Image (cartoon, rainbow, N blue to C red):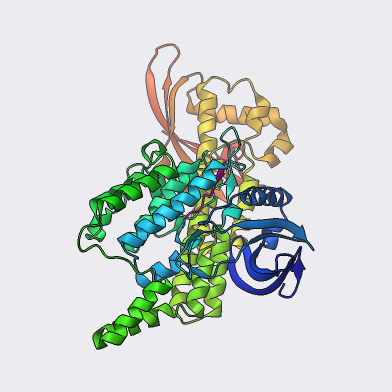
Amino acid sequence: MEGKTLGNCRLLRKIGQGGMGAVYLAHHETLDKSVAVKILPESLASDEGFVERFLREARAAAKLDHPNVIRVLDAGSAEGAHYIVMEYVDGTDLQKIVERRKKIGVRDTLSVAKHVALALAAAHKLGIVHRDIKPANILITKNGTVKVSDFGLARHVQADGQVTRPDEMVGTPHYISPEQARAEKVDGRSDIYSLGATLYCLLTGKPPFSGPSALSIVLKHTDPNARPTPVRRLEPSVPETVEALVEKAMAKDPARRFQTAEELAEEVDRIRGAGMPKGVPSGVLLTPQKKRRLLLAGAAAGAAGLVLLVLLLAMMGPGKAERAYMEASRSQDMSVRAAMLEEMSRRFPGTEWARRADEEARSIRSALLEVEIKEIEARASDPNVPFKDLMLQLDMLRGKYPGEYAKAIDRRENKLHVARVTSRTKWLGDYVREGRFDRDDEEIAKYVDPAHVRRVGAGWAAAGIRMIMGIALHFGGRVQSYRVIGNEITCTNRKEASVPVEFTIVRPRTNETLTHKGVIQWVWVDGDWYLPPPRMQKPRD
């Protein structure tokens, strides 16, 4: 794309890559200034509905003009590409600063909180919810100005309170609000929660929740009983008032948070006005003025000069592998993030960052696979769902998740088969218990080996099953209860299964209650489980 012109922008060089596309430094011919151009990836550009929302919401964000916001200047489509033109900011995002410094100190954190809150307040007044506030989307310019980025990818709230895509969970697992994670309606209070989680990270050097997978982290945000480790336990120098601010911003119930971003900004002012206790660190967001003071101090004393040298070396920034890892980790789309992490690992084999990328990619893949398998398992419990379709979905997952993931799929397949024969056996029991077994040949025949039904017809096939069940029920007994003995089920994948059952019958003349056990046999035919011909059933006491 370098050298091409999109609209009025001539692309100069690629400066970033994320899940929502590549970012290029460009020259705006009309404005005669440097701008940043984000181009949607092909995987998203092919979705016409997404592109339409993308352009509409980017243009809505262009109305947002605030000194703490990276402004959206334009959005459009050209030569098959869909793009956003943004203000170009020369600076560093807080994620990189935290990774280098571990934390940034109370005073700088409060400064970030105030300016981000003001940016959010301006956006919320226009009905725009950012939905992805996190350290990586907050930049510190060369002169120390705080800027919030990616408002062009935010979501616009309509007059009725609905977001343009209420069913879409957008956000980063470490900073996502509970209601956003549940794909519920969101408003400005969702951004306040994410800002609170960001402030927690800035103060302690780590996000509020961690876990082996993205899904496990999201579940902690949604769990009303899950609480992050208190800020002051990790960083005792943080004043109680600052800890309370973070806790209120991160309240699981939106009604218990700051109700507006202005309220949060006012609380910051109140804390600042009360003064910082002695010993509170000032932070390490190095503006040019701070850098000059450090250089003077280093020239004045040898020990201070050594400290300055360490600081300057740290400021040199991450290497190529680290930058690639951080860029891959920014993607909002979990599948895209895993693919980018895997690609980063292949590009920088043997590095510590490649090892981290491999671990994170495996964790993401495992979480995504778990979600997809659980969806299939849920459908398998419905006896009317074509099981052949479920097996096809499972086989497709094997292609999507090869290697070690395919082995996990194989282990879960047996559970699917057990769930299927269990649900069909329960249907059979309910049919008998409800007294419908003598009336519906066609319905019973749906559960009998199709080859047998074709040979003898639905009526005879149903009669044979009735005969076997009649023997088991002592001809005429009323079924009072019926249950599957789940821990005794035996199932050979795509071959045969035996499901033990226990039923209690009431004899019609004597009202005598009898409890019996039996085994319902199932065979694998044409992609599903069916009752075999009657001779293969095994009633027992």
The quarter holding residue 300 reads bottom left
| Residue at 24% across, 51% down | 240
Q: Which residue occupies the foreground of this view, 58 or 40?
A: 58
Q: Which residues are magenta?
A: 127-133
443 left or right, relative to 519: right
Across and down, in percent, residue 189 comes to: 45, 42
Q: Main secondary structure of the magenta part?
A: loop
Q: Residue furthest top?
A: 509
Q: Which residue occupies the foreground of this view, 475 or 462?
A: 462
Q: Which residue occupies the foreground of this view, 347 or 414?
A: 347
| Residue at 23% across, 60% down | 237
Q: Is residue 246 magenta?
A: no
Across and down, in percent, residue 469 comes to: 53, 28
Q: Residue furthest left?
A: 278
Q: Is residue 125 above or below residue 42?
A: above
51 left or right, relative to 149: right
161 left or right, relative to 239: right
